[in-house]
Amino acid sequence: MATIDLQFATSPEKAVYNALKKLGENFTFQSQMLGPHGEKGSTIADFVLPQYRLILSVIGFYWHSNLETKTRDNLQRLALETQGWRVIYIDESDALENARFYVTEAIRGVDWSRYQYLV
Protein backbone atom coordinates (compact mmCIF):
# COMPACT_ATOMS: atom_id res chain seq x y z
CA MET A 1 0.00 0.00 0.00
CA ALA A 2 1.32 3.43 -0.94
CA THR A 3 2.12 5.88 1.81
CA ILE A 4 -0.21 8.87 1.75
CA ASP A 5 1.45 12.23 2.38
CA LEU A 6 -0.86 14.35 4.50
CA GLN A 7 1.75 17.10 4.87
CA PHE A 8 -0.25 19.57 2.79
CA ALA A 9 -3.72 18.40 3.84
CA THR A 10 -5.87 20.80 5.82
CA SER A 11 -6.96 19.89 9.35
CA PRO A 12 -10.54 19.16 8.15
CA GLU A 13 -9.18 16.91 5.37
CA LYS A 14 -7.05 15.05 7.91
CA ALA A 15 -10.12 14.56 10.11
CA VAL A 16 -12.12 13.08 7.21
CA TYR A 17 -9.13 10.95 6.16
CA ASN A 18 -8.82 9.52 9.69
CA ALA A 19 -12.58 8.88 9.91
CA LEU A 20 -12.53 6.98 6.61
CA LYS A 21 -9.56 4.90 7.80
CA LYS A 22 -11.25 4.07 11.12
CA LEU A 23 -14.41 3.05 9.26
CA GLY A 24 -12.32 0.72 7.09
CA GLU A 25 -13.45 2.36 3.86
CA ASN A 26 -11.64 1.95 0.55
CA PHE A 27 -10.85 5.45 -0.74
CA THR A 28 -8.38 7.56 -2.64
CA PHE A 29 -7.20 10.91 -1.27
CA GLN A 30 -6.59 13.83 -3.64
CA SER A 31 -7.51 12.08 -6.88
CA GLN A 32 -7.24 13.75 -10.28
CA MET A 33 -10.63 13.83 -12.03
CA LEU A 34 -12.10 15.21 -15.26
CA GLY A 35 -8.89 15.25 -17.25
CA PRO A 36 -5.15 15.73 -16.79
CA HIS A 37 -3.79 18.03 -14.09
CA GLY A 38 -3.85 21.64 -15.22
CA GLU A 39 -6.32 21.06 -18.04
CA LYS A 40 -9.27 23.43 -18.02
CA GLY A 41 -12.19 21.78 -16.26
CA SER A 42 -10.07 19.21 -14.44
CA THR A 43 -10.30 18.94 -10.69
CA ILE A 44 -8.74 17.15 -7.76
CA ALA A 45 -11.34 15.31 -5.70
CA ASP A 46 -10.60 15.33 -1.98
CA PHE A 47 -11.85 11.77 -1.39
CA VAL A 48 -13.05 9.21 -3.93
CA LEU A 49 -14.94 6.16 -2.69
CA PRO A 50 -15.33 4.06 -5.84
CA GLN A 51 -17.49 1.36 -4.23
CA TYR A 52 -20.21 4.00 -3.68
CA ARG A 53 -19.44 6.12 -6.78
CA LEU A 54 -19.03 8.87 -4.19
CA ILE A 55 -16.81 11.92 -4.00
CA LEU A 56 -16.44 13.74 -0.70
CA SER A 57 -15.38 17.36 -0.96
CA VAL A 58 -14.26 19.14 2.20
CA ILE A 59 -15.39 22.75 1.81
CA GLY A 60 -14.22 25.88 3.58
CA PHE A 61 -16.60 28.79 3.15
CA TYR A 62 -13.77 31.32 3.15
CA TRP A 63 -12.15 29.80 0.06
CA HIS A 64 -15.37 28.83 -1.68
CA SER A 65 -17.53 31.90 -1.06
CA ASN A 66 -16.83 34.05 -4.12
CA LEU A 67 -18.97 33.77 -7.24
CA GLU A 68 -16.15 32.52 -9.50
CA THR A 69 -15.25 29.67 -7.15
CA LYS A 70 -18.90 28.72 -6.56
CA THR A 71 -19.49 28.65 -10.32
CA ARG A 72 -16.42 26.43 -10.85
CA ASP A 73 -17.47 24.11 -8.01
CA ASN A 74 -20.96 23.78 -9.48
CA LEU A 75 -19.67 23.04 -13.00
CA GLN A 76 -17.27 20.41 -11.62
CA ARG A 77 -20.03 18.82 -9.54
CA LEU A 78 -22.35 18.68 -12.56
CA ALA A 79 -19.60 17.17 -14.74
CA LEU A 80 -18.86 14.50 -12.12
CA GLU A 81 -22.56 13.72 -11.68
CA THR A 82 -22.88 13.34 -15.46
CA GLN A 83 -20.21 10.63 -15.19
CA GLY A 84 -22.23 8.81 -12.54
CA TRP A 85 -20.55 10.17 -9.40
CA ARG A 86 -22.39 11.50 -6.35
CA VAL A 87 -20.70 14.57 -4.91
CA ILE A 88 -21.28 15.36 -1.26
CA TYR A 89 -19.78 18.33 0.52
CA ILE A 90 -18.57 18.21 4.11
CA ASP A 91 -18.19 21.64 5.67
CA GLU A 92 -14.81 22.15 7.31
CA SER A 93 -16.43 23.00 10.67
CA ASP A 94 -18.44 19.76 10.56
CA ALA A 95 -15.33 17.75 9.67
CA LEU A 96 -13.52 19.17 12.68
CA GLU A 97 -16.51 18.70 14.99
CA ASN A 98 -17.44 15.11 14.13
CA ALA A 99 -15.91 13.78 10.91
CA ARG A 100 -17.05 10.21 11.51
CA PHE A 101 -20.72 11.23 11.71
CA TYR A 102 -20.62 13.33 8.54
CA VAL A 103 -18.65 10.72 6.61
CA THR A 104 -21.12 8.00 7.64
CA GLU A 105 -24.02 10.22 6.64
CA ALA A 106 -22.39 10.99 3.28
CA ILE A 107 -21.97 7.28 2.57
CA ARG A 108 -25.69 6.89 3.31
CA GLY A 109 -26.34 9.66 0.76
CA VAL A 110 -27.13 12.44 3.23
CA ASP A 111 -25.53 15.83 2.54
CA TRP A 112 -25.58 18.05 5.63
CA SER A 113 -23.44 20.75 4.06
CA ARG A 114 -24.68 24.30 4.10
CA TYR A 115 -22.49 24.90 1.03
CA GLN A 116 -24.79 22.89 -1.24
CA TYR A 117 -27.39 25.65 -0.83
CA LEU A 118 -24.93 28.41 -1.69
CA VAL A 119 -23.82 26.98 -5.04
Image (cartoon, grey):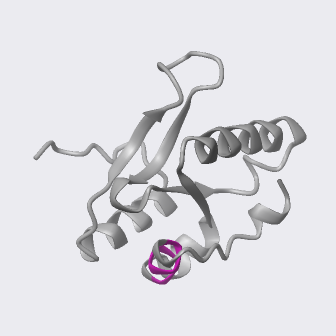
Identify whether 74 is placed above or below 44: below
Q: Is residue 105 magenta?
A: yes
x and y percent of residue 95 in the render? Answer: 53, 71
Q: Work out whether residue 65 or residue 71 is closer to the camera in this orientation and state it.
A: 71
The structure residue drawn at horizontal position 41% and vertical position 62%, both measured from the top left corner, is 52
Which quadrant of the figure has residue 7?
A: top left
The structure residue drawn at horizontal position 49% and vertical position 53%, both measured from the top left corner, is 10
Identify whether 52 is placed above or below 100: above
Is residue 105 rendered to the left or right of residue 89?
left
Identify whether 65 is placed above or below 40: below
The magenta stretch spans which residues? 101-106
Q: Which residue appears farthest toward the left when viewing the image?
A: 1
The structure residue drawn at horizontal position 10% and vertical position 47%, both measured from the top left corner, is 1
Q: Work out whether residue 118 or residue 12 is closer to the camera in this orientation and state it.
A: 118
x and y percent of residue 54 in the render? Answer: 47, 58
Q: Is residue 83 magenta?
A: no
Q: Which residue appears farthest toward the right when viewing the image?
A: 67
x and y percent of residue 74 in the render? Answer: 76, 44
x and y percent of residue 6 in the render? Answer: 33, 48
Q: Is the stretch drawn in magenta largely helix, strand or loop?
A: helix
> What is the total number of numbered labels drawn onto the structure image?
0
The structure residue drawn at horizontal position 75% and vertical position 48%, both measured from the top left corner, is 64
Q: Which residue appears farthest toward the top when viewing the image?
A: 39
Is residue 56 rendered to the left or right of residue 9?
right
Identify whether 49 is placed above or below 84: below
Which quadrant of the figure has residue 67?
A: top right
